[in-house]
Image: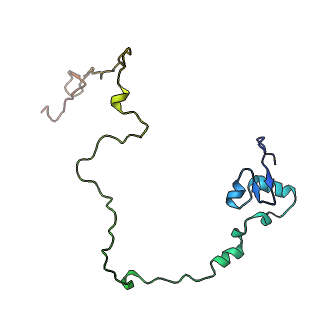
Amino acid sequence: MSCYDGARYVVNFQKFSCSCRKWDLTGIPCNHAMSAICSQVLDPEDFVNPCYSVQTFKRVYQYEIMPVNGPKLWAQTGNIPPLPPNFGRKEGRPSRARRMEPDEIPNKQRGSIKRGQKKPIKLKRQSYTVKCHYCGGWKSTSYTTNPKSRS
């Protein structure tokens, strides 16, 4: 069977299989198998796995599911009942460092300089002066004037 994109798939009606393997895995004919079935003017329902039939569904669910007594009526054992897992916060100060992937290089090794290499350029934080709109003076960006403290 040829597709619109030029790919070719082999459909086998006797084995109920296609080379794309979708029909093999699901039991329902893939679009390649459906186009081959329709080109042969065959009934598509004959090529679906019998596990999807109504008769199989009725045979599987023919027995009643009997209700189970509640936990109050269960037989008591001498064992300690299991406790639910603790998903709360862990004790102590939380860690700030993120967990690294196994293939990730730690920061200490990442920035190491080998012989003959130049040091990487570090950019420094720039501070510039701005005019304060409260007091009208020129201030550095490292601090601000609070109008409440001006009183």
Residue 13, located in which quarter of the rendered image?
A: bottom right
x, y percent for residue 58: 67, 78
48 in relation to 144, above or below: below
At 19% across and 25% down in the image, what residue appears? 135
x, y percent for residue 5: 76, 41
At 73% across and 55% down in the image, what residue appears? 30
x, y percent for residue 147: 18, 33
147 in relation to 14, above or below: above
At 41% across and 82% down in the image, what residue appears? 70
Instruction: Answer with left or right where residue 133 lies relative to residue 106.
Output: left
Residue 136, located in which quarter of the rendered image?
A: top left
In-front residue for pair 109/127: 109
Instruction: Answer with left or right where residue 42 lies relative to residue 62.
Output: right
103 in relation to 116, above or below: below
At 36% across and 16% down in the image, what residue appears? 115
x, y percent for residue 50: 72, 69
In-front residue for pair 40/100: 100
Q: Where the C terminus falls, by quadrant?
A: top left
